Image: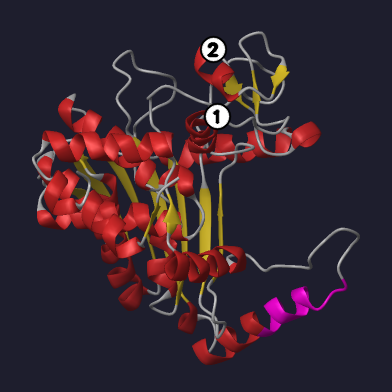
Amino acid sequence: MPIVQADRLTRIGAALLKGAGASDEEAQAVAVGCVNANLAGHDSHGIIAIPTYIDRVRAGHIVPGAKWTVVQESPTTTVIDGHWGFGFHVNTKAMELTIAKAKTANVAACTVFRQSHVGRLAAYPLMAMREGMIGIATADSGRSPKHVAPFGGREARLGTNPISIAVPSDLDAPFYLDMATSAVAVGKVQLAVARGEPIPTGWIIDAEGRHTTDPTQYRKGGALLPLGGTEGYKGSGLAAMVEVLCGLLTGLGFGVEPTGRHNDGVFMAVFNVAAFRPLKDFKREVADFARYLKSTPPSEGSKGVFYPGEVEYLREVERRRNGIEIEDTTYEKLRALAGEYGLAGELGLA
């Protein structure tokens, strides 16, 4: 597999998105968001997604240059219509507005609807964390085709419905959670298909409701399983609550529309730590807490405890130094798009 440095991969992604009609700001937001996912080790949300986004632009499912609007707001809340713009761009603006309100009111929340895929969800709570605030985000794919079978079922009725929370600390690596409520993100199944690799038991079931390690069975009528294995009712319950916050509270509804248009609904909230206790004390204690977790002796076969967000940070350090591996099928798609837009020579993809 080719190994590409992060800066070059960002330039490639941004150039291809601009070729598809995205503005400079939109292209940069999406490319940076994708490459940051690669850096953190979440390759399912990385550069592999850009050809899909370009396909959606061509289908009219993403509208470059769309102007997001505030539908209604109060001093602490905002409802935003993305008008089918790039989710990375719209959701960043929504979080910026929510942080600004929390700086005045201490607590703020927003909902966003009619936007495309928002990428790696942690990107948005991390924005709040960098401002000394606690950020929370949940996301749902609206009424686009679903991926996850509710616990005990075999047909997909739920999205992967991720949850992310980030908190400020004195740690080098940010302290944050970023998780799907499914056993795995659908992009990781697609990544396994692209790499020709099997997947672990417990990720998906086939069309007959049987467990399988063949990732190609997902596209043949299979479904992802909820988080939790034999206790999958926990992941299923979390997913249902995300659906309420991001599907019902936003007005997107539930179920599947025949158009199949991906429509991320998002709920985000920000809490100003200084409204509850001195920020410097909180940041110090979060760091102490992380070190307390890590101080436990490792269990058998374990390398020890990593606090939430630490593994992603270590991957980013390594990948910034050594580059990012790109599976051959994704690299060939990028090459083909570069050739189509007359950018192959400029981007070194000839």
Seen from this angle, which residue lies furthest front?
350
Q: Residues within 10 Å of mark 1 (few under 14, many from 20)?
A: few
Q: Position of residue 165 (x, y in %)?
A: 52, 61
Which type of secondary structure does the marked residue at label 2 adopt?
A: loop
Q: Disc 2 designates what residue?
A: 221
Q: Quadrant of the C terminus?
A: top left
Give whichever of 149, 99 is nearer the camera. Answer: 149
Give the color scheme: rainbow, by chain, secondary structure or one colour: secondary structure
Q: Position of residue 24 (x, y in %)?
A: 11, 56
Q: Quadrant of the N terminus?
A: top left
Q: Which residues are magenta?
A: 288-297
Q: Seen in the image, is 120 located left or right of residue 51?
A: right
Q: Position of residue 46 (x, y in %)?
A: 40, 48
Q: How many marks?
A: 2
Seen from this angle, which residue lies furthest top?
208
Seen from this angle, which residue lies furthest right?
300
Q: Residues within 10 Å of mark 2 (few under 14, many from 20)?
A: some
Give whichever of 6, 147 is nearer the camera. Answer: 6
Amino acid identity at mark 2? Gly
Residue 24 higher or lower than 126, as above or below? above
Depth check, mark 1 against mark 2: the one in front is 1
Whether residue 295 appears in magenta in the rendering, the answer is: yes
Q: Position of residue 310 (x, y in %)?
A: 60, 69
Amino acid identity at mark 1? Gly
Residue 243 higher or lower than 300, as above or below? above
Question: Residue at 15% across / 44% down in the picture?
Answer: 344
Q: Disc 1 designates what residue?
A: 196
Residue 258 higher or lower than 95, as above or below? above
